[in-house]
Image (cartoon, coloured by chain):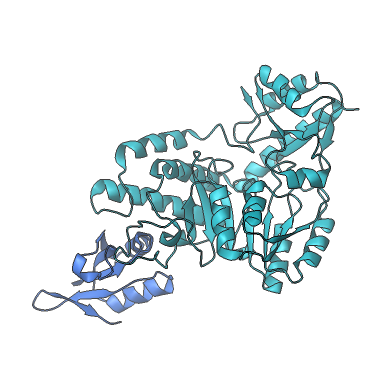
Amino acid sequence: MGFYFVTFRSVTFAQRADRLLSQRGIRVNLMRTPRWMEEQGCGYALKLWTDDISRVVYLLRESKIQLRKVYAQREDGEMEEVKL
Amino acid sequence: MIYLDNGATSFHKPSAVYQAVQDALHSCANPGRGGYAAARKAADVVYGCREQAGKLFGCLPEQVVLTTSCTHGLNLAIRSLVKPGSTVVVSGFEHNAVTRPLHALGTKIRIAGRKLFDWEDTLNDFESQLDGADAAVFTQTSNVFGYILPVEQMAAMCREQGIPFVIDAAQSAGTLPISMETLGADFIAMPGHKGLLGPQGTGLLLCKDRGEPLLYGGTGSYSRQQTMPPELPDRLEAGTLNVPGYAGLTEGLRYLNKTGVETIFRREHQLLRRCVRGLQKAGMRVYAGDHQAATVSFLPGMDCEEAAEELARQGIAVRAGLHCAPCAHESAGTLETGTVRVSIGYGTFEKQIAAFLQSASKLPRFS
Protein backbone atom coordinates (compact mmCIF):
# COMPACT_ATOMS: atom_id res chain seq x y z
CA MET A 1 0.00 0.00 0.00
CA GLY A 2 1.47 3.34 -1.04
CA PHE A 3 1.30 6.57 0.85
CA TYR A 4 0.35 9.97 -0.48
CA PHE A 5 0.14 13.57 0.56
CA VAL A 6 -2.99 15.56 -0.19
CA THR A 7 -2.50 19.27 0.49
CA PHE A 8 -5.04 21.92 1.50
CA ARG A 9 -4.71 25.63 1.96
CA SER A 10 -7.24 25.83 4.76
CA VAL A 11 -6.93 23.80 7.93
CA THR A 12 -10.74 23.53 7.95
CA PHE A 13 -10.80 21.58 4.68
CA ALA A 14 -7.93 19.41 5.90
CA GLN A 15 -9.86 18.66 9.07
CA ARG A 16 -13.04 17.81 7.20
CA ALA A 17 -11.06 15.53 4.89
CA ASP A 18 -9.42 13.94 7.93
CA ARG A 19 -12.84 13.15 9.47
CA LEU A 20 -14.32 11.92 6.19
CA LEU A 21 -11.49 9.57 5.27
CA SER A 22 -11.05 8.26 8.81
CA GLN A 23 -14.75 7.39 8.87
CA ARG A 24 -14.20 5.41 5.66
CA GLY A 25 -11.44 3.40 7.32
CA ILE A 26 -8.59 5.11 5.50
CA ARG A 27 -5.46 5.66 7.57
CA VAL A 28 -4.66 9.37 7.63
CA ASN A 29 -2.39 11.71 9.49
CA LEU A 30 -3.10 15.46 9.51
CA MET A 31 0.06 17.55 9.48
CA ARG A 32 1.56 20.83 8.32
CA THR A 33 2.30 20.79 4.61
CA PRO A 34 6.03 20.34 3.92
CA ARG A 35 7.29 23.72 2.85
CA TRP A 36 8.38 22.63 -0.65
CA MET A 37 4.89 21.36 -1.48
CA GLU A 38 3.17 24.71 -0.95
CA GLU A 39 4.59 27.59 -2.94
CA GLN A 40 2.12 30.09 -1.42
CA GLY A 41 3.39 29.25 2.05
CA CYS A 42 1.62 27.60 5.01
CA GLY A 43 -1.03 24.97 4.71
CA TYR A 44 -2.11 21.60 5.99
CA ALA A 45 -1.83 18.17 4.44
CA LEU A 46 -3.07 14.67 4.98
CA LYS A 47 -0.54 11.89 4.76
CA LEU A 48 -2.60 8.87 3.85
CA TRP A 49 -2.15 5.24 3.00
CA THR A 50 -4.33 3.78 0.26
CA ASP A 51 -4.33 1.48 -2.75
CA ASP A 52 -6.81 3.68 -4.57
CA ILE A 53 -5.88 7.37 -4.49
CA SER A 54 -8.32 8.09 -7.32
CA ARG A 55 -11.16 6.93 -5.10
CA VAL A 56 -9.90 9.14 -2.27
CA VAL A 57 -9.78 12.20 -4.50
CA TYR A 58 -13.23 11.39 -5.82
CA LEU A 59 -14.58 11.18 -2.25
CA LEU A 60 -13.05 14.55 -1.35
CA ARG A 61 -14.36 16.30 -4.43
CA GLU A 62 -17.79 14.71 -4.04
CA SER A 63 -17.89 16.20 -0.53
CA LYS A 64 -16.92 19.64 -1.88
CA ILE A 65 -13.62 19.60 -0.03
CA GLN A 66 -11.22 21.91 -1.82
CA LEU A 67 -7.86 20.21 -2.13
CA ARG A 68 -4.69 21.67 -3.57
CA LYS A 69 -2.39 18.94 -4.80
CA VAL A 70 -1.71 15.22 -4.50
CA TYR A 71 1.79 13.83 -4.10
CA ALA A 72 2.74 10.17 -4.49
CA GLN A 73 5.89 8.35 -3.51
CA ARG A 74 8.04 7.28 -6.46
CA GLU A 75 9.97 4.02 -6.54
CA ASP A 76 13.15 5.87 -5.54
CA GLY A 77 11.39 7.15 -2.41
CA GLU A 78 10.99 10.78 -3.55
CA MET A 79 7.58 12.44 -3.62
CA GLU A 80 6.15 13.82 -6.84
CA GLU A 81 2.94 15.55 -7.74
CA VAL A 82 0.33 13.46 -9.49
CA LYS A 83 -2.53 14.89 -11.53
CA LEU A 84 -5.89 13.28 -10.89
CA MET B 1 -30.85 36.82 41.30
CA ILE B 2 -33.86 36.00 39.17
CA TYR B 3 -32.38 36.42 35.72
CA LEU B 4 -34.85 37.44 33.03
CA ASP B 5 -32.53 39.20 30.60
CA ASN B 6 -31.66 36.34 28.28
CA GLY B 7 -32.22 38.62 25.32
CA ALA B 8 -29.01 40.37 26.36
CA THR B 9 -27.03 37.25 27.20
CA SER B 10 -27.68 33.82 28.64
CA PHE B 11 -26.34 34.19 32.15
CA HIS B 12 -26.79 30.52 33.04
CA LYS B 13 -25.15 27.89 30.80
CA PRO B 14 -24.81 24.11 30.82
CA SER B 15 -21.95 23.10 33.14
CA ALA B 16 -19.99 21.63 30.22
CA VAL B 17 -19.64 25.16 28.80
CA TYR B 18 -17.73 26.45 31.84
CA GLN B 19 -15.54 23.35 31.94
CA ALA B 20 -14.68 23.55 28.25
CA VAL B 21 -13.55 27.18 28.55
CA GLN B 22 -11.25 26.29 31.42
CA ASP B 23 -9.88 23.19 29.69
CA ALA B 24 -9.12 25.16 26.53
CA LEU B 25 -7.25 27.82 28.49
CA HIS B 26 -5.03 25.10 29.89
CA SER B 27 -4.52 23.02 26.75
CA CYS B 28 -4.88 25.07 23.57
CA ALA B 29 -2.31 27.08 21.62
CA ASN B 30 -3.07 28.94 18.39
CA PRO B 31 -5.32 27.02 15.96
CA GLY B 32 -4.29 26.61 12.32
CA ARG B 33 -0.82 27.90 12.93
CA GLY B 34 1.32 24.97 14.07
CA GLY B 35 1.63 21.20 13.88
CA TYR B 36 2.44 20.47 17.53
CA ALA B 37 -0.05 18.95 19.94
CA ALA B 38 -1.37 22.12 21.59
CA ALA B 39 -1.92 23.82 18.22
CA ARG B 40 -3.62 20.69 16.89
CA LYS B 41 -5.80 20.58 19.99
CA ALA B 42 -6.84 24.20 19.41
CA ALA B 43 -7.60 23.47 15.75
CA ASP B 44 -9.71 20.49 16.83
CA VAL B 45 -11.65 22.67 19.26
CA VAL B 46 -12.35 25.26 16.57
CA TYR B 47 -13.32 22.63 14.03
CA GLY B 48 -15.59 20.99 16.60
CA CYS B 49 -17.42 24.29 16.97
CA ARG B 50 -17.91 24.58 13.20
CA GLU B 51 -19.05 20.96 13.07
CA GLN B 52 -21.65 21.34 15.82
CA ALA B 53 -22.91 24.58 14.26
CA GLY B 54 -23.09 22.93 10.84
CA LYS B 55 -25.15 20.12 12.35
CA LEU B 56 -27.55 22.54 14.03
CA PHE B 57 -27.95 24.90 11.08
CA GLY B 58 -27.68 22.59 8.08
CA CYS B 59 -24.43 23.78 6.53
CA LEU B 60 -20.85 22.65 6.02
CA PRO B 61 -18.15 23.42 8.62
CA GLU B 62 -16.32 25.82 6.30
CA GLN B 63 -19.52 27.85 5.87
CA VAL B 64 -19.39 28.65 9.58
CA VAL B 65 -17.31 31.78 10.15
CA LEU B 66 -16.39 32.45 13.77
CA THR B 67 -17.02 36.02 14.84
CA THR B 68 -16.78 37.98 18.06
CA SER B 69 -20.50 38.79 18.17
CA CYS B 70 -23.67 38.91 16.11
CA THR B 71 -22.91 42.57 15.42
CA HIS B 72 -19.53 41.59 13.98
CA GLY B 73 -21.24 39.02 11.76
CA LEU B 74 -23.87 41.49 10.59
CA ASN B 75 -21.21 44.05 9.73
CA LEU B 76 -19.32 41.42 7.72
CA ALA B 77 -22.48 40.37 5.92
CA ILE B 78 -23.71 43.88 5.21
CA ARG B 79 -20.30 45.07 4.01
CA SER B 80 -20.12 42.02 1.74
CA LEU B 81 -23.54 42.48 0.15
CA VAL B 82 -24.44 46.14 0.28
CA LYS B 83 -22.83 48.84 -1.82
CA PRO B 84 -22.84 52.45 -0.62
CA GLY B 85 -25.97 54.28 -1.71
CA SER B 86 -27.91 51.14 -2.63
CA THR B 87 -31.49 50.40 -1.56
CA VAL B 88 -32.01 47.92 1.25
CA VAL B 89 -35.25 46.55 2.70
CA VAL B 90 -35.40 45.88 6.43
CA SER B 91 -38.24 44.86 8.71
CA GLY B 92 -39.92 47.24 11.12
CA PHE B 93 -38.28 45.47 14.06
CA GLU B 94 -34.56 45.84 13.46
CA HIS B 95 -31.79 46.32 15.99
CA ASN B 96 -29.14 49.01 15.62
CA ALA B 97 -26.71 46.21 14.70
CA VAL B 98 -28.55 46.17 11.36
CA THR B 99 -29.56 49.78 10.88
CA ARG B 100 -26.32 51.50 11.94
CA PRO B 101 -24.09 49.64 9.45
CA LEU B 102 -26.65 50.44 6.74
CA HIS B 103 -26.69 54.11 7.71
CA ALA B 104 -22.88 54.15 7.75
CA LEU B 105 -22.94 52.99 4.12
CA GLY B 106 -25.39 55.71 3.17
CA THR B 107 -27.98 53.21 1.99
CA LYS B 108 -31.58 54.07 1.24
CA ILE B 109 -33.45 52.07 3.88
CA ARG B 110 -36.99 50.88 3.21
CA ILE B 111 -38.77 49.73 6.35
CA ALA B 112 -41.33 47.00 5.69
CA GLY B 113 -44.07 45.87 8.08
CA ARG B 114 -44.71 47.91 11.20
CA LYS B 115 -47.53 45.95 12.82
CA LEU B 116 -46.54 43.78 15.74
CA PHE B 117 -47.36 40.06 15.51
CA ASP B 118 -49.05 40.56 12.14
CA TRP B 119 -47.60 38.25 9.49
CA GLU B 120 -50.00 39.48 6.82
CA ASP B 121 -48.84 43.07 7.24
CA THR B 122 -45.19 42.04 7.38
CA LEU B 123 -45.39 39.91 4.25
CA ASN B 124 -47.51 42.27 2.16
CA ASP B 125 -45.36 45.27 2.92
CA PHE B 126 -42.11 43.34 2.55
CA GLU B 127 -43.13 42.07 -0.88
CA SER B 128 -44.04 45.54 -2.13
CA GLN B 129 -40.86 47.12 -0.73
CA LEU B 130 -38.65 44.49 -2.36
CA ASP B 131 -39.48 45.83 -5.81
CA GLY B 132 -36.28 47.36 -7.18
CA ALA B 133 -34.30 46.83 -3.99
CA ASP B 134 -30.65 45.74 -4.03
CA ALA B 135 -30.63 43.70 -0.83
CA ALA B 136 -32.67 42.82 2.26
CA VAL B 137 -31.68 42.44 5.89
CA PHE B 138 -34.21 41.25 8.45
CA THR B 139 -34.42 39.86 11.92
CA GLN B 140 -36.02 36.53 12.68
CA THR B 141 -37.21 37.59 16.13
CA SER B 142 -37.61 41.09 17.54
CA ASN B 143 -35.27 41.57 20.49
CA VAL B 144 -37.80 43.91 22.12
CA PHE B 145 -41.14 42.20 21.62
CA GLY B 146 -40.28 38.61 20.76
CA TYR B 147 -42.23 38.91 17.50
CA ILE B 148 -41.23 35.98 15.29
CA LEU B 149 -41.21 37.22 11.72
CA PRO B 150 -42.22 34.92 8.83
CA VAL B 151 -38.62 34.58 7.63
CA GLU B 152 -39.22 31.45 5.55
CA GLN B 153 -41.71 33.36 3.38
CA MET B 154 -39.57 36.50 3.35
CA ALA B 155 -36.58 34.44 2.27
CA ALA B 156 -38.64 32.82 -0.49
CA MET B 157 -39.67 36.27 -1.78
CA CYS B 158 -36.03 37.36 -1.90
CA ARG B 159 -34.97 34.18 -3.67
CA GLU B 160 -37.75 34.53 -6.24
CA GLN B 161 -36.69 38.09 -7.03
CA GLY B 162 -32.98 37.30 -6.97
CA ILE B 163 -32.34 39.74 -4.13
CA PRO B 164 -29.48 38.82 -1.79
CA PHE B 165 -30.41 38.80 1.86
CA VAL B 166 -29.11 38.56 5.41
CA ILE B 167 -30.98 37.17 8.40
CA ASP B 168 -30.27 38.48 11.89
CA ALA B 169 -30.76 35.47 14.16
CA ALA B 170 -29.60 37.26 17.31
CA GLN B 171 -32.67 36.26 19.29
CA SER B 172 -33.72 33.12 17.45
CA ALA B 173 -30.57 31.01 17.22
CA GLY B 174 -30.96 28.23 19.74
CA THR B 175 -34.69 28.65 20.20
CA LEU B 176 -36.11 28.37 16.68
CA PRO B 177 -35.15 25.93 13.94
CA ILE B 178 -32.83 27.54 11.39
CA SER B 179 -31.72 25.80 8.22
CA MET B 180 -29.19 27.52 6.02
CA GLU B 181 -30.03 25.11 3.23
CA THR B 182 -33.80 25.71 3.40
CA LEU B 183 -33.63 29.48 3.81
CA GLY B 184 -31.02 29.95 1.10
CA ALA B 185 -29.75 33.10 2.80
CA ASP B 186 -26.52 34.71 1.72
CA PHE B 187 -25.67 35.16 5.39
CA ILE B 188 -27.19 34.34 8.76
CA ALA B 189 -25.58 36.10 11.74
CA MET B 190 -25.97 35.11 15.37
CA PRO B 191 -24.31 35.61 18.74
CA GLY B 192 -22.69 32.72 20.56
CA HIS B 193 -23.61 33.92 24.04
CA LYS B 194 -27.40 34.14 23.90
CA GLY B 195 -29.54 31.18 22.81
CA LEU B 196 -26.48 29.18 21.79
CA LEU B 197 -25.36 29.24 25.43
CA GLY B 198 -21.69 29.97 24.78
CA PRO B 199 -19.48 32.63 26.37
CA GLN B 200 -19.53 36.32 25.49
CA GLY B 201 -17.11 37.34 22.76
CA THR B 202 -18.32 34.60 20.44
CA GLY B 203 -20.61 34.61 17.42
CA LEU B 204 -21.27 32.79 14.17
CA LEU B 205 -21.78 33.97 10.64
CA LEU B 206 -23.19 31.31 8.33
CA CYS B 207 -22.16 32.09 4.77
CA LYS B 208 -23.60 30.71 1.56
CA ASP B 209 -20.43 30.93 -0.50
CA ARG B 210 -18.68 34.28 -0.26
CA GLY B 211 -17.81 37.27 1.89
CA GLU B 212 -15.58 40.31 2.03
CA PRO B 213 -13.25 40.76 4.99
CA LEU B 214 -13.53 43.53 7.55
CA LEU B 215 -10.17 42.62 9.05
CA TYR B 216 -7.01 41.78 7.16
CA GLY B 217 -4.13 39.78 8.61
CA GLY B 218 -2.75 36.37 9.37
CA THR B 219 -4.82 33.27 8.73
CA GLY B 220 -2.21 30.52 8.82
CA SER B 221 -2.74 29.99 5.08
CA TYR B 222 -1.48 31.56 1.82
CA SER B 223 1.21 33.32 3.84
CA ARG B 224 3.19 34.65 0.88
CA GLN B 225 0.10 36.18 -0.65
CA GLN B 226 -0.70 39.75 0.37
CA THR B 227 -4.42 39.45 -0.22
CA MET B 228 -6.77 37.50 2.00
CA PRO B 229 -7.33 33.83 1.06
CA PRO B 230 -10.27 33.23 -1.26
CA GLU B 231 -11.69 30.31 0.75
CA LEU B 232 -14.06 30.45 3.67
CA PRO B 233 -13.70 30.49 6.58
CA ASP B 234 -10.10 31.81 6.42
CA ARG B 235 -11.09 34.78 4.27
CA LEU B 236 -13.18 36.28 7.07
CA GLU B 237 -11.12 35.19 10.06
CA ALA B 238 -7.91 37.22 10.24
CA GLY B 239 -6.09 37.06 13.56
CA THR B 240 -6.08 34.67 16.46
CA LEU B 241 -9.45 33.19 17.33
CA ASN B 242 -11.02 33.15 20.78
CA VAL B 243 -10.39 29.44 21.29
CA PRO B 244 -11.59 29.20 24.91
CA GLY B 245 -14.76 31.01 23.88
CA TYR B 246 -15.44 28.66 20.99
CA ALA B 247 -14.65 25.67 23.20
CA GLY B 248 -17.49 26.82 25.43
CA LEU B 249 -19.74 27.58 22.49
CA THR B 250 -19.14 24.06 21.15
CA GLU B 251 -20.62 22.67 24.33
CA GLY B 252 -23.59 25.02 24.12
CA LEU B 253 -24.20 23.84 20.56
CA ARG B 254 -23.79 20.23 21.59
CA TYR B 255 -26.43 20.72 24.28
CA LEU B 256 -28.82 22.22 21.71
CA ASN B 257 -28.19 19.44 19.20
CA LYS B 258 -28.89 16.88 21.91
CA THR B 259 -31.95 18.57 23.43
CA GLY B 260 -33.50 19.92 20.24
CA VAL B 261 -34.52 23.53 19.72
CA GLU B 262 -38.19 22.58 19.37
CA THR B 263 -38.12 21.18 22.91
CA ILE B 264 -36.47 24.35 24.17
CA PHE B 265 -39.00 26.54 22.40
CA ARG B 266 -41.96 24.62 23.85
CA ARG B 267 -40.59 24.86 27.39
CA GLU B 268 -39.81 28.56 27.16
CA HIS B 269 -43.10 29.32 25.44
CA GLN B 270 -45.05 27.79 28.32
CA LEU B 271 -43.21 30.10 30.69
CA LEU B 272 -43.90 33.03 28.41
CA ARG B 273 -47.67 32.39 28.39
CA ARG B 274 -47.63 32.24 32.19
CA CYS B 275 -45.68 35.49 32.31
CA VAL B 276 -47.97 37.27 29.86
CA ARG B 277 -51.11 36.22 31.74
CA GLY B 278 -49.63 37.32 35.04
CA LEU B 279 -48.57 40.72 33.74
CA GLN B 280 -51.99 41.30 32.21
CA LYS B 281 -53.63 40.33 35.49
CA ALA B 282 -51.33 42.81 37.30
CA GLY B 283 -52.67 45.61 35.12
CA MET B 284 -49.62 46.13 32.93
CA ARG B 285 -49.79 47.15 29.29
CA VAL B 286 -48.48 43.92 27.73
CA TYR B 287 -47.26 43.52 24.15
CA ALA B 288 -48.27 39.97 23.30
CA GLY B 289 -49.64 38.08 20.36
CA ASP B 290 -49.31 35.12 18.06
CA HIS B 291 -45.86 34.31 16.69
CA GLN B 292 -44.10 35.31 19.88
CA ALA B 293 -40.82 33.92 21.21
CA ALA B 294 -40.00 33.83 24.92
CA THR B 295 -39.61 37.59 25.19
CA VAL B 296 -42.28 40.05 26.27
CA SER B 297 -42.30 43.81 26.72
CA PHE B 298 -44.64 45.60 29.09
CA LEU B 299 -45.36 49.02 30.51
CA PRO B 300 -46.33 49.70 34.11
CA GLY B 301 -47.85 52.95 35.28
CA MET B 302 -44.40 54.46 35.88
CA ASP B 303 -41.17 55.19 34.03
CA CYS B 304 -39.84 51.93 32.59
CA GLU B 305 -36.26 52.49 33.80
CA GLU B 306 -37.49 53.24 37.31
CA ALA B 307 -39.62 50.11 37.21
CA ALA B 308 -36.59 48.02 36.19
CA GLU B 309 -34.60 49.65 39.01
CA GLU B 310 -37.31 48.75 41.48
CA LEU B 311 -37.28 45.14 40.26
CA ALA B 312 -33.47 45.08 40.43
CA ARG B 313 -33.64 46.10 44.08
CA GLN B 314 -35.70 42.96 44.60
CA GLY B 315 -33.10 40.82 42.84
CA ILE B 316 -34.88 40.63 39.49
CA ALA B 317 -32.87 41.28 36.33
CA VAL B 318 -34.89 42.71 33.43
CA ARG B 319 -33.97 45.31 30.85
CA ALA B 320 -35.74 48.61 30.29
CA GLY B 321 -35.40 51.37 27.72
CA LEU B 322 -35.08 51.13 23.95
CA HIS B 323 -33.04 47.92 23.81
CA CYS B 324 -30.83 49.32 20.99
CA ALA B 325 -33.83 49.00 18.71
CA PRO B 326 -35.49 52.39 18.11
CA CYS B 327 -36.88 51.06 14.84
CA ALA B 328 -38.85 48.36 16.69
CA HIS B 329 -40.08 50.80 19.34
CA GLU B 330 -41.16 53.25 16.66
CA SER B 331 -43.18 50.47 15.02
CA ALA B 332 -44.90 49.62 18.29
CA GLY B 333 -45.45 53.23 19.35
CA THR B 334 -43.14 52.95 22.37
CA LEU B 335 -40.24 55.09 21.17
CA GLU B 336 -40.93 57.80 23.76
CA THR B 337 -41.66 55.57 26.73
CA GLY B 338 -39.47 52.55 26.07
CA THR B 339 -40.61 49.29 27.66
CA VAL B 340 -39.60 46.83 30.33
CA ARG B 341 -38.47 43.61 28.68
CA VAL B 342 -38.61 40.14 30.18
CA SER B 343 -36.66 37.51 28.27
CA ILE B 344 -36.79 33.87 29.28
CA GLY B 345 -34.00 31.38 28.72
CA TYR B 346 -32.04 28.31 29.78
CA GLY B 347 -31.99 29.15 33.48
CA THR B 348 -35.64 30.23 33.78
CA PHE B 349 -38.14 28.07 35.65
CA GLU B 350 -41.73 28.34 36.90
CA LYS B 351 -40.80 29.48 40.39
CA GLN B 352 -38.77 32.39 39.02
CA ILE B 353 -41.63 33.55 36.83
CA ALA B 354 -43.92 33.31 39.86
CA ALA B 355 -41.53 35.39 41.99
CA PHE B 356 -41.15 37.95 39.22
CA LEU B 357 -44.92 38.26 38.82
CA GLN B 358 -45.33 38.76 42.53
CA SER B 359 -42.89 41.71 42.41
CA ALA B 360 -44.34 43.07 39.16
CA SER B 361 -47.83 43.05 40.64
CA LYS B 362 -46.66 45.69 43.13
CA LEU B 363 -45.72 48.12 40.35
CA PRO B 364 -48.30 50.81 39.53
CA ARG B 365 -50.88 49.61 37.05
CA PHE B 366 -50.83 51.03 33.55
CA SER B 367 -53.68 53.44 33.01
Q: Residue B302 location in percent, x, y?
A: 82, 24
Front residue of this view, candidates B347 and B231: B231
A57 relative to B92, above or below: below
A36 sits to left or right of B142: left
Considering every residue shown, the one lying at the far right of the view is B367
Tell me which corner region of the image, top left, top right, bottom left or bottom right, holds residue A71.
bottom left
Q: Position of residue A63 (x, y in %)?
A: 43, 70
Asked if residue B199 can be seen in this view, the reply is: yes
The reply to whether residue B273 is visible in this rendering is no
The chain painted cyan is B
* B319 is higher (above) or lower (below) than A77: above
- Of A53 and B116, nearer the camera is B116
The quarter of the picture where residue B323 lies is top right
Residue at horizontal 40 percent and vertical 53 percent from the top? B47
- Residue at image point 60% right, 48% down: B173
Q: Is residue B41 above or below residue B90?
A: above
- Left or right: where B140 falls relative to A36: right
Q: Colour of chain A?
A: blue
Quadrant (top left, top right, bottom left, bottom right) of the N terminus of chain B: top right
Point out the residue furthest to the left here: A76
Residue at left 50%, top 63%? B212
Q: Position of residue B210 (x, y in %)?
A: 51, 67
Looking at the image, residue B163 sits to the left or right of residue B226; the answer is: right
Q: Check the picture and name the quadrant holding the C terminus of chain B.
A: top right
Residue at the location (70% across, 58% down)? Answer: B151
- Numbered label tally: 0
Q: Position of residue A68 (x, y in %)?
A: 32, 72
Res. B167 image quadrant = bottom right
